[in-house]
Image: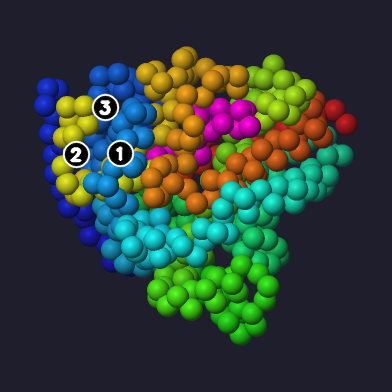
């Protein structure tokens, strides 16, 4: 894989203030504190890697629908010196980084499958899957939750939706977690070859699955996807493969992190966990507040097609922009006591900011919400005496965030 240094970024223009340039070191301990320290005085801050952050929720929501801001294409890997290989192609051929008609035709084959009404029909099956996982370790009285529940549930669901063999879950989830190391400004040089190999393995896996359906079509999503894509004639073979790769990644890692964090946050606020256990009607609000307080996706990447003014700061054309949901969802202008975790708060926006906005709003939003709600409901009903033994650490301030281990215990 060839690499080259990224081009020097065009300077941001500030009408009445010097624009701070933040470093990786400033985010190492407490990203929330770093965002908070700049948000009041700066609607936009630069990053030493060459991108910039939009920090306030109102600006984020407005810009997410602004036609002058598009998906990033291959700008992010190029900024990191990655100019070919599977990682580069994932940005070049995937729906998440495409714009206009290209985005439409890459996303269209999945819109009906992941529509809210279709996903709602899966709710009982997702609840059943969550309860089945709990049954496997309930009698032990303790569990390492990330590996034995949070990682397995979304992988089970996406494998069943796509028609992937459940026996393949341990392999493709390992590749997903390695591949997503790249989707962050805090990626380390040593992470890049690991992510490249993992993405290549996911590409080969998608090819194997699609080749199998071409030979022996079945009554499953992959067979229907191939038939529809072939009939429409709008997707190249590589585009077909990378849409499946992105669905596997998107349906596995982000929900895993969110499941971990909502349980951890509730157990760190015992009275709120007890309230959810007493009243299942609180579950949707608990899910929404957990996503606000510690989102699994810290930011959405965009590219400015022309100069854009944000409260006195002009972001020049051609700049990579992070719409920071992590900052925006703690915006004091929108949320009372934003650094307080409170499942009883009144949510001020109808659409949750963590799922993005505009044409690129997350296609898996309905599925993610159902997985989060049903996993929490199953745990609260089966083990209300759940206790947090070892809390997880959540890392990252851009892209997909990462979690480590979480140990839970309860009375048997």
Closest to the observer: 283 or 205?
A: 283
Task: Tell me whether the residue at label 3 lies in contact with that at label 1, contact meaning CB atoms closer than 8 angstroms.
Answer: no
How many discs mark residues in the rendered view? 3
Q: Which residues are magenta?
A: 284-299
Q: CA distance from mark 2 to mark 3?
A: 13 Å
In the rendered image, residue 141, in percent from the top left (x then y), is placed at 83, 34
In primary-sequence order, the first of circles 3 and 1 is: 3
Q: Residue extending furthest top?
A: 337
In the rendered image, residue 381, in percent from the top left (x then y), is placed at 80, 33
Residue denoted by label 3 = 43
- Above or below for 54 versus 358: above
- Above or below for 186 versus 41: below
Displayed quadrant of residue 258:
top right
Residue positioned 47% across, 52% down in the render: 180
- Image position of 393 (left or right of 88): right
Displayed quadrant of residue 326:
top left
Q: CA distance from mark 1 to mark 2?
A: 9 Å
Residue denoted by label 1 = 63
Q: For residue 286: magenta?
A: yes
- Image position of 25 (left or right of 240): left
Residue denoted by label 2 = 308
Closest to the observer: 24 or 45?
A: 45
Could you tell me if residue 38 is visible in this image? yes
Helix, strand or loop status at disc 3? loop
Q: Which class describes the residues within 10 Å of circle 1: few (<14), some (14-19), or many (20+)?
A: many
Tell me the quarter of the image containing the N terminus: bottom left
Could you tell me if residue 388 is visible in this image? no
Helix, strand or loop status at disc 1? helix
Q: Which class describes the residues within 10 Å of circle 2: few (<14), some (14-19), or many (20+)?
A: some
Q: CA distance from mark 3 to mark 1?
A: 12 Å
Task: Tell me whether the residue at label 1 lies in contact with that at label 2, contact meaning CB atoms closer than 8 angstroms.
Answer: yes
């Amino acid at each position: 894989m060839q690499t080259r240094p990224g081009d020097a970024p065009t300077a941001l223009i500030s009408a009445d203030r010097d624009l701070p340039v933040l470093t990786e070191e400033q985010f190492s301990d407490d990203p929330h504190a770093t965002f908070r320290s700049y948000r009041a005085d700066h609607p936009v801050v630069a990053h030493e890697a060459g991108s910039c952050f939009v920090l306030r929720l109102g600006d984020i929501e407005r810009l997410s629908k602004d036609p002058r801001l598009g998906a990033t294409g291959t700008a992010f890997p190029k900024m990191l010196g990655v100019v070919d290989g599977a990682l580069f192609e994932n940005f070049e051929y995937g729906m998440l980084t495409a714009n206009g008609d290209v985005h439409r035709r890459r996303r269209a084959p999945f819109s009906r499958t992941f529509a809210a009404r279709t996903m709602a029909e899966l709710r009982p099956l997702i609840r059943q899957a969550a309860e089945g996982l709990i049954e496997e370790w309930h009698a032990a009285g303790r569990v390492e939750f990330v590996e034995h529940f949070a990682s397995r549930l979304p992988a089970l669901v996406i494998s069943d939706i796509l028609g992937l063999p459940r026996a393949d879950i341990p392999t493709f989830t390992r590749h997903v977690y390695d591949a997503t190391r790249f989707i962050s400004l805090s990626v380390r040089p040593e992470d890049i070859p690991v992510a490249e190999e993992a993405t290549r393995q996911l590409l080969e896996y998608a090819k194997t699955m699609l080749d199998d359906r071409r030979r022996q079509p079945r009554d499953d999503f992959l067979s229907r996807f191939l038939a529809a894509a072939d009939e429409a004639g709008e997707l190249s073979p590589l585009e077909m493969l990378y849409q499946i790769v992105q669905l596997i990644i998107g349906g596995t890692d982000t929900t895993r992190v969110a499941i971990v964090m909502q349980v951890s946050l509730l157990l760190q606020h015992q009275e709120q966990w007890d309230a959810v256990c007493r009243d299942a009607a609180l579950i949707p609000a608990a899910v929404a507040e957990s996503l606000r307080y510690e989102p699994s996706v810290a930011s959405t990447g965009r590219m400015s097609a022309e100069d854009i003014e944000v409260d006195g700061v002009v972001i020049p054309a051609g700049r990579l922009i992070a719409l920071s949901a992590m900052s925006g969802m703690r915006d004091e202008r929108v949320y009372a006591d934003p650094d307080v975790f409170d499942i009883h708060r009144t949510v001020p926006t109808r659409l949750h900011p963590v799922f993005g906005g505009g044409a690129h709003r997350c296609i898996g939003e309905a599925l993610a919400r159902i997985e989060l709600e049903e996993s929490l409901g199953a745990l609260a009903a089966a083990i209300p005496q759940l206790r947090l033994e070892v809390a997880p650490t959540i890392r990252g301030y851009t892209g997909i965030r990462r979690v480590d281990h979480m140990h839970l215990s309860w009375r048997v």
